[in-house]
Amino acid sequence: MAVAFAAGVAVGTALLALPVARAGPGSASFLEAVFTATSAVCVTGLAVVDTPTYWSGFGEVVILALIQIGGFGIMTLASLLGLLVSRRLGLRTRLTAQAETKSLGLGDVRRVLLGVAAFSLTFEAIAALILTLRLATRYDEPLGQAVYHGISTPSPRSTTRGSRFTATT
């Protein structure tokens, strides 16, 4: 698991260091790229630069993909650890856990991975749809911007390029 996270950070750093990932001239420094990639994969939400203004569309897609990969990794690890723990429990508790999770055991890793992916993508799609509809109807965002903001919601303390709504503090 640690190697997978490290690989995600390495690939993300390399992609974010490309000039195409930055909205302005030049490319991101190594520290900006590695910190952003690490923060995205670990799903911490920390940033050293203003994401919507510093990163290009390509950079934002890379960050979004790293967040997805990191979140998927954390959920998968938790699910697999749950299966591992359920195998160490008594027979009665184990049977109950298997009945509740509809799992046959540790050999069923593929089904766990597919289940985690389906669960994550379903609920993320529902949330993005709700946000998109809310932004399009309540804040009169054009549909393209509403979809963009529904998928990648801006920070409440900042606004995104071309956004018509601002947060009140």
Image (tube, helix red, strand yellow):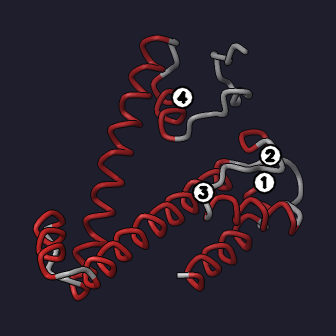
Mark 2 → mark 3, Cα distance in angstroms = 19 Å
Between 91 and 122, the one nearer to me in the picture: 91
User: What residue did someone put label 2 on?
Assistant: 54
Horizontal and vertical percent position of residue 106 = 25, 85
| Residue drawn where x is 71% and y is 49% of the image | 56
Helix, strand or loop at mark 4:
helix
Pick whichever of labels 4 and 3 is earlier in the sequence.
Answer: 3
On residue 103, the disc is none
Mark 4 → mark 3, Cα distance in angstroms = 24 Å
Helix, strand or loop at mark 3:
loop
Name above or below for residue 116 compared with residue 157.
Answer: below
State which quarter of the image contains the C terminus.
Answer: top right
User: What residue did someone put label 3 on?
Assistant: 43
Between disc 2 and disc 3, the foreground one is 3
Horizontal and vertical percent position of residue 43 = 60, 57
Q: Which amino acid type is marked by label 4?
A: Gln
Name above or below for residue 132 compared with residue 48.
Answer: above
